[in-house]
Image: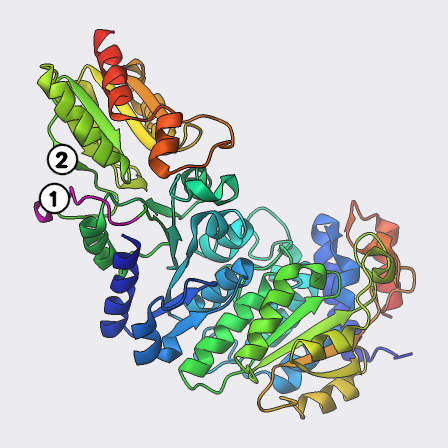
Amino acid sequence: MRKTSLDCVYKLAQYNKRVVFIGSDLGPGVLDIMKQKMPERFFMEGVSEQHVIGMAAGMAIEGYIPYVNTIATFITRRCYEQIALDVCLQNLPIRLIANGGGLVYAPLGPTHLAVEDIAIMRALPNMTVVAPCDADEMKRFMDKTINWPNPIYIRLAKGYDKVISNEKYGFEIGKAIVMKQPKEGLFITTGVMTQLAIQAAKKLEESGISCGIMHMHTIKPLDHDALNQWLPKVNGVVTVEEHTRIGGLGSAILEHCSDEMPEQIEKIFRMGLPDNFSDKYGSQNSLLEHFGITIDSLCIAMQMQLRK
Amino acid sequence: MNILDTRSKELRKMVVQMVEAERRGHIGPALSIIEIIRVLYDTFLKYDPTNPFWPERDRFILSKGHGCLALYAVLADKGFFPKKELYNFCKHDSILGGHPERNKAPGIEATTGALGHGLPIGVGIAIAGKIQKKNHRVVVITGDGEINEGSVWETAMSAAKHQLSNLIVMIDYNKFQSYGPTIEVLDLEPLADKWRSFGFEVDEVDGHDVAALEELTTRLPLNISKPTAIICHTIKGKGFPFAEGNAAWHHKSGLKDEEINAMYDCLK
């Protein structure tokens, strides 16, 4: 997914001269082709995230569309004020490509886990927050980033994840994709958690429980229409995110329900990470299991919601 | 010690008119940069007040956004907006807030207020200018307290790396920050050597000496392959003896009639 997103930046840059790429201190060879073919629009600025965001803002003020890339924790926490004031307050078309959203960097420990990134990005006015589910969807999404007028936070997963999206779904920023129409229950997911929910839905189907999948790739702006359409039609909803339960996808959905359809709230169960720093290493999958986000736990959560 | 000429006094009167509106404002930090901004707009910067985003303009960023009273006075004086706007400073619907905002007041290039933001933005603008092979210059005024911020030095390294000769940083070295003297809060010395070691061509000037500032601007950029840093030695609160070097005048709220009158009296 990461490679795809960066390849897309180069492709976009080939036909749009306003596209520039700014990295901090990425791995050797990243976007070498762009560096060779268009060195005047390729920047590797060093470990200086505050500077990088300000510099991107200056270039955006002058009409460029900067695609900024570094690790998710550093592109969110370290330079949050720059994102708030330089990018969002001035509403500039900067794209923040965040490597390793969620638990991807599990072996590197809590300093490198981006588990509150959606919450803090979502809190900023003008910011758009998108978490594609696989590399194919990333391609369709990146094409849409050129003309989107606001800043975008792009949450990347580990990479080489199974492709579950389909060309037929299309992609519009802010429009949820119903991958499977719901009957009794509905999983609402974002990022690669959609992959997990699909497997959970299959397992539930074997037990005679039919659940739909709503892939909410865009957490902000949230697709209120899709929620208004589908929530009243199901008996139980489980939201799943690789993110703290505070302020992410589940919170956004509950906020919407609280404002517009409070009668739906009790249907909803939020699955996400607990409110503590990880004290384990291992792998993304082992941490997900440690924090209780597994196919089995999704199934149990849905069954409990449907028994209500 | 510099004697303020009529124009410098007139600009200061406009500052007092602004703070009179809501009885508040960052007075000391504005008074130290009035001559710098005056000279930039009188003799150096290219701009068109009737077309603030004229593509060929030079870009000016007041990174120490809290010094905006000085910038607002000069922008009004140059016709970017009517002088009557000054009387609305900090009022509910004003275009002139306590810190300058892009797209609110004509002539404001970038929103500033939180410190350490203007120089990175200026570097981005300067790089964009170089890519486009444009000739406009980017001038950024930073405070001295402001350059405590690490972001300033991250960006300084980048400006040198990219050989941004179109970038001019002017440091308002009034030697006071909010709490007190910079030498006590976080000493900046050796300041010129710091900028030199970061890859800038450096000069120093009396930031209230109009003739010296004008002469200096004729020599910019100081080096055709390096960014420029000008250390402007200034006096916080310049022009009002009771405010000069007085940390209590960094920001004032609830200004009393006698304080307003005292400021006007200094400008007679």
Task: Examine the image and state in which quarter residue A15 appears.
Answer: bottom left
Q: Do labels 1 and 2 touch, CB within 8 Å?
A: yes
Q: Secondary structure at mark 1?
A: helix
**Residue at the spot of label 1:** A169
Q: Position of residue B159 (x, y in %)?
A: 57, 76
Task: Examine the image and state in which quarter residue B196 appears.
Answer: bottom right
Q: Amino acid at mark 2?
A: Met
**Residue at the spot of label 2:** A179
| Circle 2 Cα neighbour tier, 10 Å, few/some/many (<14 / 14–19 / ≥20) | some
Name the residue located 37 percent from the left edge and 67 percent from the top edge.
A21
Q: Position of residue B143 (x, y in %)?
A: 72, 65
Does A284 appear above or below B24?
above
Question: Horizontally, is A144 left or right of B126 in the view?
Answer: left
Q: CA distance from mark 1 to mark 2?
A: 8 Å
Whether discs 1 and 2 lie on one chain: the answer is yes
Q: Is residue A219 magenta?
A: no
Residue A256 badge: none
Q: Numbered disc 2: what chain?
A: A
Q: Position of residue B244 (x, y in %)?
A: 88, 63
Q: Amino acid at mark 1?
A: Tyr
The magenta segment is: A159-168
| Circle 1 Cα neighbour tier, 10 Å, few/some/many (<14 / 14–19 / ≥20) | few
